[in-house]
Image (cartoon, rainbow, N blue to C red):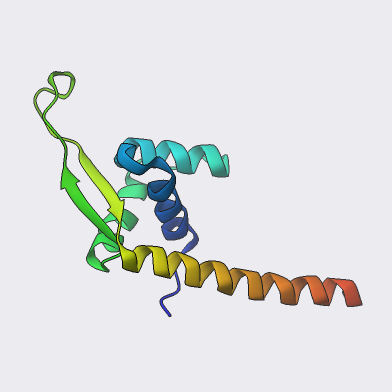
Amino acid sequence: MDMLTKLEELVLIAVLKLKDRAYGITIYEYVVQKTGNKVAVSSVYFPLERLVRKGYLESFKGDPTPKRGGMRKNYYALTREGVAVLQDNRELNRAIWGDVDRAAARGAKS
């Protein structure tokens, strides 16, 4: 199983939630909104590139827009592999947090 970084996980979830509106800035805004941490916009683009290389996302160009001076937005969509790695990581997190919950129930030592 490929373990995702927390930021990669957030980016994949953002793409899943945003559907056909998933491009750099909307993904960045989702991450900032969910974490409450204002990070550099560029910090989202590095995981996006990595996730495309790993086959978890596909990237495609939107139509040119006058607002962007005729430039096209890069949109992202989850692949089957991306959905699978998200599900695997969710199960891993559940198992880990279950261990934490059991340890906390027994009482932590100082």
- Whole-percent x and y of residue 108? 87, 74
For this orientation, the residue located farthest to the front is: 80
For this orientation, the residue located farthest to the bottom is: 1
- The answer to which of 88 and 5 lies nearer the viewer is 88
Q: Residue at x 50, y 60 (%)?
A: 6
Quadrant where the C terminus is found in the figure: bottom right
Q: How many marks?
A: 0
Q: Eyeballing the image, is 71 above or below 31? A: above
Q: Residue at x 75, y 73 (%)?
A: 100
| Side (left or right) of 109 relative to 47 | right
Q: Residue at x 65, y 74 (%)?
A: 96
- Whole-percent x and y of residue 61? 14, 42
Q: Quadrant of residue 8?
A: bottom left
Q: Eyeballing the image, is 66 above or below 63? A: above
Q: Eyeballing the image, is 56 above or below 100? A: above
Quadrant where the N terminus is found in the figure: bottom left
- Looking at the image, can residue 94 be seen? yes
Q: Quadrant of residue 91?
A: bottom right
- Looking at the image, can residue 109 be seen? no
| Side (left or right) of 15 relative to 60 | right
| Side (left or right) of 3 relative to 109 | left
Q: Eyeballing the image, is 71 above or below 22? A: above
- Whole-percent x and y of residue 5? 46, 65
